[in-house]
Amino acid sequence: MRPDARPIVRALLALGCLLFAAPGHAQPLPAELYDRLNVDIVRDQVIPGYRQLEAETAGLREAAAAYCGQPVDTAFEDLIARYHGTFDAWMGVQWLTFGPAKDLMRFQRMQFWPDSRNRVSRQLSSLLANPREDLLDPDVLAEASVALQGFPALERLLFGDDPLLADTYSCALTIAITANLATIAADLALAWDPLPDVPEESARAAIDALGYAEPAAFTSELYQTLYQHLEAIVTLKLARPIGETLEEARPRRGESWRSGRSVRNIHLNLLAIRGVIDNSDALGFADIVADTAGRNDVAKALRDAIAEAIAKAELLDAPLEETLVDPSLRPDFVRLITAANTARERVAIGVGEAMGLLVGFNSLDGD
Amino acid sequence: MRRILVVAGLGVLVASNAEAATDASAVLDTYADIAHAMYEDALADARRVQAAVEELTSNPSDATLQAARETWIEARRPYQQTEVYRFGNAAVDDWEGRVNAWPLDEGLLDYVDEAYYGTESDENLLYSANVIANPTLQFGGETIDASAITKELLADVLQEADNIEANVATGYHAIEFLLWGQDLNGTGPGAGDRPHTDFDPANCTGGNCERRVDYLVTVTDLLVDDLEEMVGLWADGGEARLAVTDGPVEDGLTAIVTGLGSLSYGELAGERMQLGLLLHDPEEEHDCFADNTHESHYFNQVGMIAIYNANYERIDGSVVSGPSLSDLVAEAEPALDERVKADMAATYAAMDVMMETAQGGMAYDQMLGEGNDEGNRILQDVIDGLIVQAEGFELVVAALDLSLIDFEGSDSLDDPDAVFE
């Protein structure tokens, strides 16, 4: 049987209007436990993720400067490879939308997406038609429209129809954008890792600096953010582009379609989510659910759902423009949506109930 | 696709508040009464727009165009107050896109300045379709016969054509675009400036004046129809009223809080305000053609305060009031009620600064311009106020022991095989 995308897509596109709430189902856990979970996740997942992003963006900036200075094919290939490496790192921390990522609008400056009103294309074409020299100063760019600052604008410059040529405004803008990304990434890494020589203390200091009244409030923030990320994967990255029927597939609504890495992004997002759920030897959400809340069944269901979604994502490596309109590939994409949505529901309901956490009003509530 | 809500009441609110003074079901009755009054007011003002459009199209002049614009601005005031009913009430949410969909790719409807608007979009094949100029539209493999401009064409064919939300053919913003035209002033001063001769077949500017007149009359009639329908849904025995008053009390209260929280946070603070500030883009304002965004946001907040306190002042000056959500919160947790009221007052004050700034000559689209630190700050203060206000509503959910789980579509989603059928 061939999966029909219609019911699931309709259901998912209508999602995201209400709050999940399950207060009071579980006894609050001891504050020390929330604290341990928080520190473990920041130390083992958040800090390494941002340090990786910092290193990748620094390399990307160098590669952009190298290519624009000496535009040989190998230098362009290196630049493209650096772009992918950097975006891989970004997918590992994309779920972290609060705190330092929210301050100074860093998240949106890194990646303004989805862009249902075509703002990036409009603002970028307008800029390339009427170049503004002042925006080549990364400090000035950092204050300009987010549509011009981050990955989506860079992706158009690197993967657009017009080849990127040296000695052009486009190349100079490419350097400025990569420098801006490197600065933002370095600031994010510093905010989460203020004491790099002592990881445990560093994680604690970063959490303290965010000023949550109690450890449970930070845990709740992590949980809500994780849930909203899963919701974004399901609704924005998966359900929006697939369309209810093959004719209605709109691969260009997918993330990163120009660089052909839409599903790779989701795969890397899911691996990052698994890190927070399992967190190798240290504490993750699933450990608390199983060991403290005594809900082995919920923890197992959650782990299974994430593993299933990862397995489905691994099967798909073609660009969305092929996957969504190829009758032999499209069913795998539907299976990926189903698996990711199951993971979403298990985080929302299972973990929420077991840990007494609730998902609040959601930034996706708007139109 | 109807939203299915499964609400698990964790505390039995009515029982636990047996000694309380406020009857929760009376709160819900008042909430429905205010909805009915608000939509009646919106309808009355929409009829005034309809009359003014009639006057404009039968006697096009600067004066009649200006009068039509003024009635539109006045009509937004009661309508924007109703928006707090959108989230949480399925009947309203399902209907809302017909009357207030935004943002729109206005090139679907009429001529646009290509240098300003561009000509194509990754997302929307009908980005520049211009139905007023083109009796036949083609996109992808489809052909639309638009030779007669009818309610059916607008509501059933063009609205959200190709499943693109930016294809907005009906509602306040389509009317706004027709009355004002594009605002080509960027983040500089000035609103849209369509000449009245665009509606004058005898001295036609902009081309296709008869089709433009047909469009304006039809889309205004549709707005009146749609508002009549919504008034009916909140009248005695109406579907929207019954959904609130005849179900479990927890459901109804949850609808109230959901409306307040979702409008404050995701919709107003996020989609309508923060995004514009991030992009410094003059098109990212809710009433962008008329430069009326400051009023649009302000009256959202006025509506939210009216709902929380169950006290609505109608356009004729009379008041609809009764037992309120505020009363219930005050009984459950007095400090929280004080907090929510203070938060809402603070947001209102920030909105007031925005209003005065706009009335003083710095329009909303100028406030969000790149490098306008003062204007940016004014808008950010409103956004921050709305976010704090939304956090208060999250606490109200907990304080009233409400619990709400969105199981939408879950039958098919829980069972992966269901989607293979």
Image: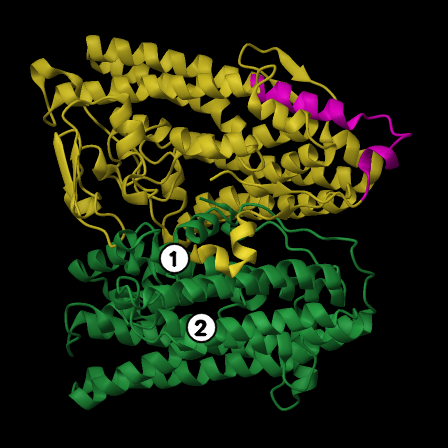
Chain colours: A green, B yellow
Q: Are marks 1 and 2 on the same chain?
A: yes
Local crowd size for mark 2, using a 10 Å CA cut-off: few (<14), some (14–19), many (≥20): many
Task: Report in which chain the residue with disc 1 lies.
Answer: A
Examine the image and state in which quarter residue A64 appears. Answer: bottom left
Residue B188: % across, % down: 30, 41
Q: Mark 1: give few (<14), some (14-19) or many (20+) Cα within 10 Å.
A: some
Considering depth in this image, is A89 or A281 the residue closer to the camera? Answer: A281
Residue B351 figure quarter: top right
Residue B187 position (above or below residue A295): above
Write down the residue under mark 1.
A114
Q: Residue at x 32, y 86 (%)?
A: A62
Contact (CB < 8 A) between labels 1 and 2?
no
Q: Position of residue A31 (x, y in %)?
A: 81, 69
Instruction: Decide whether the magenta segment is chiefly helix, strand or loop.
Output: helix
- Mark 1 or 2, nearer chain start: 1
- Amino acid on which disc 1 is placed: Pro
Task: Please state if B216 lies on the left or on the right of B98 as rendered.
Answer: left
| Residue at 47% across, 76% down | A311
Up/down of B142 relative to A344, above or below: above
Q: Which mark is drawn over residue A364?
A: none
In the picture, the quarter occupied by the C terminus of chain B is bottom left
Image coords of residue A89 (percent x, y):
44, 79
> Which residue is disc 2 drawn over?
A312
In the image, A328: left or right of B399? left
Q: Give the residues in magenta.
A: B11-36
Judged from the image, the secondary structure of the residue bearing numbered disc 2 is helix
Query: Label 1's element?
Result: loop
Q: Could you tell me which chain the residue with mark 2 belongs to?
A: A
Q: Is residue A68 visible?
A: yes
